[in-house]
Image (cartoon, rainbow, N blue to C red):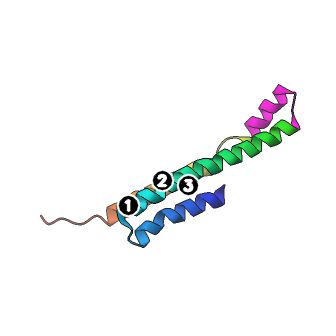
Amino acid sequence: MYVHAAVFLIGGLLPMLFGAGLLGAVLWNGVAGVSANFLYYLHVTFKLEIIQRRAPTDKAIRDVLIADAGGVQPYVWWLGVGLMAFAIAMGILQAPVGKK
């Protein structure tokens, strides 16, 4: 999933680099959102099939396996916060300076 996330991150910058404007960014974000949801659906379905094979009848073991397989790594939250702060800082630095 991290490779896909990197592709979506880099792909989100391409409309700006090629000067596609707002339409390019909106189109990329729409396609990226739909495909990311589908990829995540496939990922979760695959994980649940593996868990179902390991513990087909024991609900308690299955619940433990689901809890172990789920969740988001803590560093991902901090990476998101850092990238957001970076994006805001770049937006502030690129803001036009008005005359007084």
Answer with left or right where residue 47 lies relative to residue 7: right
Identify residue for label 2: 30
Q: Tell me: residue 35, above or below residue 44.
A: below
> Picture coordinates of residue 32 (x, y %)?
53, 55
**In which quadrant will I find the N terminus?**
bottom right
> Picture coordinates of residue 88 (x, y %)?
39, 57
Image quadrant where residue 26 sits: bottom left
Q: Is tag 2's residue or tag 3's residue first in the polypeptide sequence?
A: 2
Disc 2 residue type?
Gly
Answer yes or no: is residue 83 visible. yes
Q: Tell me: residue 80, above or below residue 63.
A: below
Observer-nearest residue: 79 or 7? 7
Image quadrant where residue 62 sits: top right
Identify residue for label 1: 23
Figure disc tally: 3
Element at label 2: helix
> Could you tell me if the residues under marks 3 and 1 are in contact, i.e. CB atoms within 8 Å?
no
User: Which residue of the protein is positioned furthest toward the bottom in this rendering?
Assistant: 18
Q: What secondary structure characterizes most of the magenta part?
A: helix
Disc 1 residue type?
Leu
Residue under the point 62% across and 59% down: 4
Answer yes or no: is residue 82 visible. no
**In which quadrant will I find the C terminus?**
bottom left
Residue under the point 87% across and 34% down: 55
Observer-nearest residue: 79 or 14? 14
Disc 3 residue type?
Leu
Residue under the point 41% across and 68% down: 16
Q: Which residues are magenta?
A: 54-68
> Picture coordinates of residue 60 (x, y %)?
82, 26
Q: Which mark is residue 79?
A: 3
